[in-house]
Every structure is written in structure tokens, then in C-alpha cells.
Image (cartoon, grey):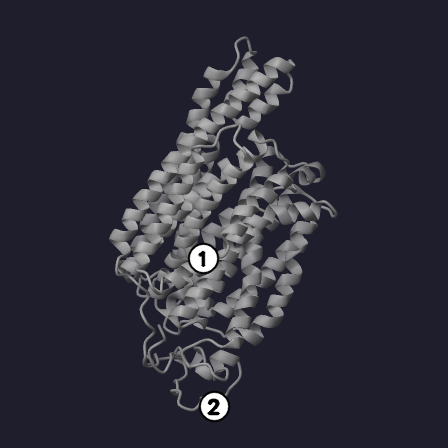
């Protein structure tokens, strides 16, 4: 049954309201990636974490989120995406309460890990439900564009939101804001969002889930550590171990009768090619973000809150690009539009090579905004291609793979671009430092820009100014090299997008229902039950769908 005046293949008012509710967990999960930036001093003062514990307070969330995405996507396809979403919302709310009132660093690390588990259920579930709620290609494109904007916007506003809360409340308030939103989700999702599952998915593969976690976590951990502290044999060994386990995981996928991920999906250009393109755009966008943040704070001397407020501006300026990209895709070949996005991003990185320590703030923000605009042209289109290329019953794992490619691309970007910038900084700062500095000050200044600024505080005013100028100039030199590398990667990505994705587009939904699989008595209900959660007669002129068969429109969708 559909809203009055809405064709059977198109979503109505109920679906759009349900979609709005689904944006709540997506916003909060993306905010939790960055919400602790301003809370670190207060947490350090109260909980007294060691340096290692402080690192894990940040990283435990991201590692669990990245490592469990594929597992949770496959689980949602089997037990129901709405059910997994509700379970994740309850877990996310409970973990937020535990984190807010943590009385030790160990408790906070555990709470952050549980938040990552909850986040791993929420992110693929929201995107998979979008795939099922919006079967019309145009509507789905609009929804994916909004989904992308909310996801990226949450990461940008997280630090600002936490900074504003910490002006008036204690550090635990940055977690308590999750609880009302999760309660609203638990209340309204059963009323507005239909349930979907794959009745033919087969049993859940516990060993496969363990292998996927054991493959992803060492690689992501090692790449992030290489970006933070440089190469070392243990980190290299972690990458090799992860790749070996990944090979075992792929072998299991190819030999299992009901694999977590259907290997046949990767033979579709619109699926495998779009995942690769998504990884590359996140390589540039996330990998360069650390340079922008450090330039605002350590070169321009802005406070963390002011830096966060200014850094939100590019995101707000380009927030409408994602929905516009999906609109343009109706008239322009997707491959060319994606390539244009990469070229725009490359132009933004080229503009950033003109930034100097004396440049006005607007030049940095303009370059960042152009980069973000190019990325936002690419991201919704590749997400839509992935979702459209995967069958509706496999939308959960397809969504999880999209998120996993984003996580891996961001980690690789931080490692490669961060290492390139750091190599230039280490070389240039030593050549620029004034003569006669104590050896300890030289060693500290050579490590990082922050270390150089700290070392300068204990030096005579004239010498301190020279150290600061040398460090800032060396950092900007490193920023330039990172921007050049990112621009080249974006240009190569544009060529790759045209070569791989030209002619690829999401297929239209099937005009007829598949035969009901055997043993589907516990599968989703017919179309009318799926849409509203209660039995209802079929609408006049709409096909009757057998129990256990996913609903499909009566005819080809509007394009």
C-alpha cells in the first residue's frame, strides 16, 4: 500500500519521514569519530590515562567500527536490517551512558569499543535500508546524496558540538547527547521503517566473521600507526599478517555455499569499480585533513574551538553538492561526472600548494572547500552505484563494503600523505633551525611541528621566534608535497573512473517477483506488510507478493 498519488514503485511520505529518522544514528555515529577532540584535557585531568591509554581512548572506537562493518552488514542481511538497527541503537545508547560516567581510563576505553560495535551495526543498516526503501532510481539517488552529506557533516561538526558542550558541562556530556536520539530511534523506527532481510542468505558464517575482523584490524592499525609514528618492522609484520588472513578470508568466500560476501558481486564493474573509486576519494579527503587542522592551529595560531568552527565552513559551503550530483547524474554519464569531481578536487589541492605561513585564512579555506566539493561530487555517485549494482537482498553487506573502503582509503591517505609531509618536515626544519640550539631542542623540533612550538617556549625570545618560523615554514613545505601527491592521485583516479565506470549505472529493479525460496516461512512479509508493519490488502492494480519474497514494483521505475 502506498501513499495517495504515489506510484507503487516510488517511495511516499512515510518512507521519507522514516528516512529522516534514520539520519539520527548516522549523524551521531559520524560525530563520535571526532567528538573527543576537545574533551582530551578534561579526561586527562580526571582519569589520568597513560599515553597508551589516551591513544586507545581515541582509537578503540574507530578500530571496532572498521573491523566489524562487514560482519554486521552480513548479519543484517540475515536477521533483518531494521532489527539490527534497533539492537545497535540500544547498544549505542547503553555504551554512551557507560562512557559518560566512566571512572577510569580502562572503563572509558571499553565503552568506546562498545560504541564502535554499536556504530558498526548502525552505519550499514541505515544505508541498506535506504536501498530497500527507495527503489526508484531518482529517489534513491537523492536519498544517497543526503545520506552522504549527513555522514561527512557529522565528522565536521563533532568537534564544534563537543567544544560548545564543554563550555558549559563536564566531559561526559559529549556522550550523553547520544541517548535521547537513540530513544527516538527506538520509538519511531518500528512505526516508520519497514523490515528487510534476505530469506535465502543461509546460516551466518562465524569463522568468516572472525577472519574478516582478523584481516582488517591489523592492516588498519598498522597503517594508522605508520602515519603517526613512521615505519617499523612490527607494523610491517601487522600488514603482512592482515593480508595473509585476508587471503584466507577470500578463499573461504569462494568455497562456502553461503558466503558472507558473494564474490560474483566484484565481477560487476559498477560494484568493484565504484568501491575502488570510493577508496581513492577518501584517500585524498581524509588523508589531507590533518594538514588543514594543524595549519589552522599551529601555523595560524587559532584556538582549537576557533579552528574547528572555521574548518566546518568548507563542509557547510559544499553541503548541497551531494544532492546536486545525483540530479546531474540523470543528464550526464556518471563516469564523466565522477571524473569531473576528481579533477575539481585536484584543483583544490593545486590551490593549497600556494598556501604559505603568511597566507590569509581564506586561501586555506578556499582550497579545502574546492577539494571537498570535488569529493562530494564523487561520493554519492559511487555509493549509489554500489547499492544499485548489488541485489536488494545483499544491500547490507554492500553497504558495509562501502564503509570499509572509506575507512581503508582514509587510513591509507593519512599514512601516505602524512609520511610524505613528515619526510619533508624532518629534512627542511633541520636546515632552517638557527645555529647553537641545544641538542635536545633540535631533536624535539625535528619530530613534529607541535614539538618545535613546545621547544621554543623555553628559549630566549629571538631564538624562539626563529625556531617557530623555521618549523612553520618546514611544515608548509611538507603540506605542499602532500597536496601535490594528492592532486596526482586525484587526476589518476579521474582517468581510472572513466576507464572502469564508463557505461556503468545502477540496474532498474526487477519488474516481477522472484519465486519464493523453500523454507521461507520466517522471511519478510508481503509488500503491504513490509511497508507498514501490519497486514493489509494489496492496493488495487498492485501485484500480490508471496510470503518470503521481497516486494518489487509493478513495472519499470521512472527514470
Q: Identify the element where label 2 is drawn.
A: loop
Q: Is residue 50 left or right of residue 144?
A: right
Q: Say above or below: 189 vs 283.
A: below
Instruction: Quadrant for residue 467, please give it.
Output: top right
Dot 2 crowding, Cα within 10 Å, few <14, some 14–19, many 20+ = few
Residue beneath label 1, please?
A: 322
Reply above or below: 477 against 508. Answer: above
412 or 225: nearer the viewer = 412
Residue 523, compared with residue 365, is above or below; it is: below
Q: Nearer the viewer, residue 424 or 361?
A: 361
- Please provide percent x and percent y for residue 325: 41, 58
Q: Which mark is residue 537?
A: 2
**Dot 1 lies on which element?**
helix
Residue in the image at 26% along x and 61% along y = 503
Q: Residue 375 at what x, y percent from top left?
A: 42, 49
Q: Residue at x 52, y 73 (%)?
A: 193
Residue shown at the point (49%, 57%) measured from the top left:
320
Residue 556 in view (yes/no)? yes
Where is residue 136 shown, x and y percent of the image? 40, 73
Identify which residue, 145 or 390, lies in the foreground.
145
CA gap, disc 1 to disc 2?
38 Å
Residue at coordinates 52% horizontally, 51% vertically from top-left? Answer: 317
For mark 1, does the 10 Å Cα neighbourhood hold few (<14), some (14 to 19), or many (20 or more) residues? many
Amino acid at each position: 500500500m502506498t501513499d495517495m498519488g504515489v506510484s507503487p514503485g516510488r517511495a511516499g511520505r512515510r518512507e521519507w519521514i522514516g528516512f529522516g529518522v534514520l539520519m539520527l544514528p548516522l549523524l551521531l555515529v559520524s560525530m563520535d569519530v571526532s567528538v573527543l577532540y576537545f574533551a582530551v584535557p578534561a579526561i586527562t585531568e580526571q582519569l589520568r590515562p597513560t599515553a597508551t591509554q589516551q591513544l586507545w581512548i581515541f582509537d578503540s572506537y574507530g578500530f571496532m567500527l572498521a573491523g566489524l562493518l562487514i560482519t554486521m552488514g552480513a548479519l543484517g542481511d540475515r536477521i533483518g536490517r531494521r532489527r539490527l538497527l534497533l539492537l545497535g541503537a540500544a547498544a549505542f545508547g547503553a555504551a554512551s551512558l557507560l562512557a559518560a560516567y566512566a571512572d577510569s581510563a580502562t572503563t572509558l576505553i571499553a565503552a568506546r569499543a562498545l560504541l564502535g560495535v554499536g556504530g558498526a551495526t548502525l552505519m550499514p543498516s541505515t544505508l541498506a535500508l535506504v536501498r530497500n526503501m527507495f527503489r526508484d532510481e531518482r529517489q534513491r539517488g537523492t536519498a544517497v546524496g543526503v545520506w552522504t552529506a549527513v555522514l561527512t557533516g557529522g565528522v565536521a561538526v563533532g568537534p564544534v558540538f563537543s567544544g560548545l558542550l564543554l563550555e558549559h558541562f563536564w566531559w561526559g556530556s559529549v556522550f550523553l547527547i547520544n541517548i535521547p536520539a537513540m530513544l527516538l530511534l527506538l520509538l519511531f523506527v518500528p512505526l516508520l521503517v519497514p523490515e528487510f532481510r534476505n530469506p535465502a542468505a543461509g546460516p551466518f558464517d562465524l569463522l568468516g566473521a572472525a577472519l574478516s575482523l582478523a584481516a582488517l584490524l591489523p592492516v588498519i592499525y598498522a597503517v594508522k600507526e605508520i602515519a603517526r609514528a613512521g615505519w617499523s618492522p612490527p607494523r610491517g609484520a601487522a600488514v603482512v599478517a592482515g593480508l595473509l588472513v585476508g587471503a584466507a578470508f577470500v578463499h573461504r568466500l569462494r568455497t562456502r555455499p553461503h558466503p558472507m560476501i558473494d564474490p560474483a558481486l566484484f565481477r560487476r564493474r559498477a560494484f568493484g569499480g565504484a568501491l575502488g573509486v570510493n577508496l581513492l576519494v577518501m584517500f585524498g579527503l581524509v588523508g589531507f585533513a590533518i594538514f588543514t587542522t594543524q595549519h589552522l592551529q599551529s601555523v595560524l595560531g587559532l584556538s582549537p574551538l576557533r579552528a574547528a568552527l572555521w574548518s566546518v565552513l568548507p563542509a557547510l559551503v559544499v553541503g548541497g553538492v551531494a544532492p546536486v550530483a545525483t540530479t546531474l547524474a540523470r543528464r550526464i554519464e556518471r563516469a564523466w561526472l565522477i571524473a569531473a569531481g576528481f579533477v575539481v578536487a585536484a584543483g583544490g589541492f593545486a590551490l593549497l600548494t600556494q598556501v604559505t605561513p603568511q597566507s590569509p585564512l581564506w586561501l586555506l579555506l578556499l582550497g579545502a572547500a574546492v577539494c571537498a566539493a570535488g569529493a562530494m561530487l564523487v561520493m554519492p555517485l559511487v555509493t549509489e552505484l554500489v547499492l544499485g549494482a548489488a541485489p536488494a537482498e545483499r544491500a547490507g553487506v554492500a553497504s558495509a563494503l562501502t564503509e570499509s573502503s572509506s575507512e581503508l582509503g582514509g587510513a591509507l591517505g593519512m599514512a601516505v600523505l602524512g609520511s610524505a609531509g613528515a619526510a619533508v618536515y624532518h629534512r627542511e626544519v633541520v636546515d632552517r633551525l638557527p645555529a647553537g640550539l641545544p641538542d635536545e631542542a633540535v631533536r624535539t623540533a625535528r619530530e613534529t611541528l607541535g614539538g618545535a612550538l613546545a621547544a621554543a617556549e623555553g628559549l630566549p625570545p629571538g631564538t624562539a621566534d626563529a625556531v617557530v618560523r623555521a618549523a612553520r615554514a618546514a611544515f608548509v613545505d611538507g603540506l605542499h608535497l602532500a597536496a601535490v601527491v594528492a592532486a596526482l592521485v586525484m587526476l589518476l583516479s579521474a582517468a581510472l573512473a572513466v576507464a572502469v565506470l564508463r557505461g556503468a549505472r545502477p540496474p532498474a529493479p526487477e519488474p516481477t517477483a522472484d519465486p519464493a525460496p523453500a523454507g521461507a516461512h520466517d522471511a519478510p512479509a508481503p509488500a503491504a506488510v513490509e511497508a507498514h508493519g501490519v497486514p493489509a490488502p494489496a492496493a488495487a492494480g498492485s501485484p500480490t507478493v508471496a510470503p518470503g519474497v521481497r516486494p518489487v514494483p509493478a513495472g519499470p521505475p521512472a527514470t
